Image: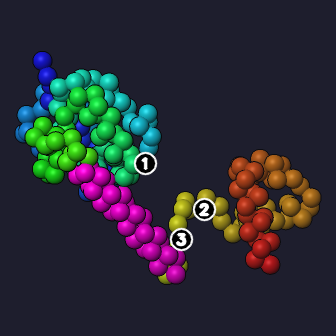
């Protein structure tokens, strides 16, 4: 018997993004089984365990239901390749946003639509990256610091520099200060550049 299987994915579980809306819509659409995960599409397919289980389970005649094509892949090539593999296996694909329904359209039209939607998803991802980079650049000009906060203070920096002047090695200093060697090296390099 053919199955109707749903797949939901979000990139991260932080902030306002949750799987709940996708899962609810997929359940309302009448899927027999549902797979979901919180993982970026930048991860290789092998690093997306729920997608791997889903792909192994799908058989010819089954229908894969997703909220939108970008849940499978955000890259143009990734999306086209994934859809092509599924169609070659005889798996039908439906999106809840009604942009794709391979059960009711010829394969040629399907691939044309997938190509257009894949290109749009790829462009959207590029725009997100660009806006993020612009936002980061603006924040840097305003003095916003990125990365992990320092776990050491000015007194520790002075102590490290004094020990270094006395000829102590990075490893020795790191052990005595309870830091790792790389941190000590960065502190010394940064302070020397400041001089």
Principal SS element in the magenta part? helix
Give the answer, above or below, for where 167 lies relative to 7: below
Local crowd size for mark 1, using a 10 Å CA cut-off: few (<14), some (14–19), many (≥20): few
* Disc 3 secondary structure class: loop
Query: Which residue is more in the foreground, 113 or 74?
Result: 113
Mark earlier in primary sequence (1, 2)? 1
Q: How is the image coloured?
A: rainbow
Residue at 70 percent of width and 51 percent of height: 179
Q: Please check the rendered image and state whether residue 116 is part of the magenta-colored stretch, yes or no.
A: yes
Residue under pointer 3: 145
Give the answer, above or below, for where 55 lies relative to 101: above
Q: CA distance from mark 3 to mark 2?
A: 11 Å
Query: Which residue is more in the foreground, 44 or 94?
Result: 94
Q: Please check the rendered image and state whether residue 111 is part of the magenta-colored stretch, yes or no.
A: no
Q: Which residues are magenta?
A: 112-141
Q: Quadrant of the C terminus?
A: bottom right
Foreground label between 1 and 3: 1
Foreground label between 3 and 2: 3
* Disc 2 secondary structure class: loop
- The disc at residue 150 is 2
* Disc 1 secondary structure class: loop
Residue under pointer 1: 42
Q: CA distance from mark 1 to mark 3?
A: 26 Å
Query: Which residue is more in the foreground, 110 or 137?
Result: 110
């Amino acid at each position: 018997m053919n199955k109707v299987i749903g797949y939901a994915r979000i990139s991260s579980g932080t902030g306002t993004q949750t799987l709940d809306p996708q899962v609810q819509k997929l359940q309302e659409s009448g899927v027999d089984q549902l797979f979901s995960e919180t993982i970026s599409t930048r991860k290789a397919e092998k690093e997306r365990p729920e997608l791997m289980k889903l792909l192994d389970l799908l058989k010819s005649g089954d229908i894969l239901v997703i909220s939108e094509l970008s849940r499978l892949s955000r890259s143009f090539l990734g999306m086209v390749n994934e859809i092509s593999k599924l169609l070659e296996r005889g798996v039908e694909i439906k999106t809840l946003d009604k942009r794709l329904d391979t059960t009711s359209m010829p394969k040629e039209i399907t691939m044309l639509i997938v190509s257009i939607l894949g290109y749009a998803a790829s462009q959207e991802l590029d725009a997100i990256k660009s806006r993020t980079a612009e936002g980061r650049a603006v924040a840097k000009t305003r003095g916003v610091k990125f990365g992990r906060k320092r776990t050491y203070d000015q007194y520790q920096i002075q102590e490290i520099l004094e020990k270094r002047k006395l000829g102590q090695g990075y490893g020795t200093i790191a052990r005595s200060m309870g830091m790792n060697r790389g941190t000590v090296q960065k502190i010394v390099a940064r302070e020397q550049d400041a001089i």
